[in-house]
Amino acid sequence: AAAAGGAVAAGAGLRGRSGEGGEEFRALEVQWMGDLIVTWLRGASCSLNVWTLMGQQSAHLRMDSPLKQVDVARVTWVSVKTLDHFILAALDARSTVSLWDSKQDFAQVYRFYCGCEEPFDLVLTQDFMAVVNDNMMENRLELCFWKLWLHPNFDEASDAPATGSGSSMASRVQPRQRPPEVAIEALRLRRATVQPGGSPAGSMISSLPMALGFAGGAMVGGAVAVAHVGAPGAALFDGESLQRLLQWELRHNARPVKRFCISDIDSYFASYRNFLNVCSFHKSGQESLSVYRSSSLHKKIFFTPAKHTKFEEWLALPGHHDGTD
């Protein structure tokens, strides 16, 4: 997961809306992870399995509710040459994101509530983690991009959002050593979410009477401390206040950095090398493709709607070894 705990490289995957009425086609899904394979049943299973290429089960991981999506990223915070260290992430129907570390025998390292009313998809890359909310009432997909900090040598204060650039993406600056007390507190908070009887970070916000709104697709800047969360007055919080409260609760280990919406169309997502590809199928029967650079989330290429072709053909873009086209 992202800048958060260190650099990771994502595997490619295709995901999209399942069809009319939000019905899901429940089939076995597979995710490659180096010399391992991850399998799960979307929308039906509360667990996922990790297998060796020889068919032996390496791990059985459980969630509290049915899985919506799983993704994996290679960790390079020790060395870019490391090929067998991965972070495995899963999003469930209760909008909880769970993270496991392959180098710790797939021990769970963090759980947090990400604020989706209808969680639909998850993408994990070297630069970010993205969750997708399916807003059927307004017929749009709502994307929220997160920075994570899972490594003690990364300081969230050094990744403050850039100003004056018109982008809400966090600036990519050299991370500095966290003060020991900050790193210790962040680790304590992560461990508390995965201990027996523990709850995902931010989960108390999901039980508040008012659901988290999307604030018009714009990221809510800053974070504010709100006391007495369980008090009756909490019912008076609007969507923006609840978003700020969630940011405050997660601030040591996770922070939303960018949001935008995709309206009136079915969309599919694929992360590959240094890019995030968003392919959209329009009501006219045409497809368009947007290509974002993962590091900045700036749109680099846009193919205007054209006659329907196979999605795989959109991804067959010539490229160089450095990830440019």
Image (cartoon, rainbow, N blue to C red):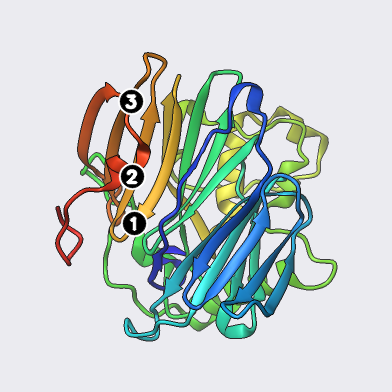
Q: Residue furthest top?
A: 284
Mark before the other along the chain sequence, 3 or 2 = 2
Residue labelled with disc 3: 308
Which residue was labeled with disc 1? 272
Q: Does 304 sit left or right of 168 as displayed?
A: left
Amino acid type of disc 2? Asn
Badge 3: few (under 14), some or many (20 or more) residues near its Cα, within 10 Å? few
Q: Are marks 1 and 3 in contact (CB under 8 Å)?
A: no
Q: Amino acid at mark 3?
A: His
Q: Is residue 184 left or right of residue 3?
A: right
Q: CA distance from mark 2 to mark 1?
A: 8 Å
Q: Nearer the viewer, residue 153 or 245?
A: 153
Q: Position of residue 244 (x, y in %)?
A: 56, 43
- Numbered disc 2: secondary structure: strand
Question: Looking at the image, do the residues carrying marks 2 and 1 touch, with CB atoms under 8 Å apart?
Answer: yes
Residue situated furthest front in the rendering: 54
User: Earlier along the polypeptide chain: callout 1 or callout 3?
Assistant: 1
Query: To which residue does mark 2 refer?
Result: 277
Q: Secondary structure at mark 3?
A: loop
Give the answer, above or below, for where 104 lies relative to 272. Answer: below
Give the number of the disc on residue 191: none
The 10 Å Cα crowd at callout 2, few under 14, some 14 to 19, many 20 or more, is: many
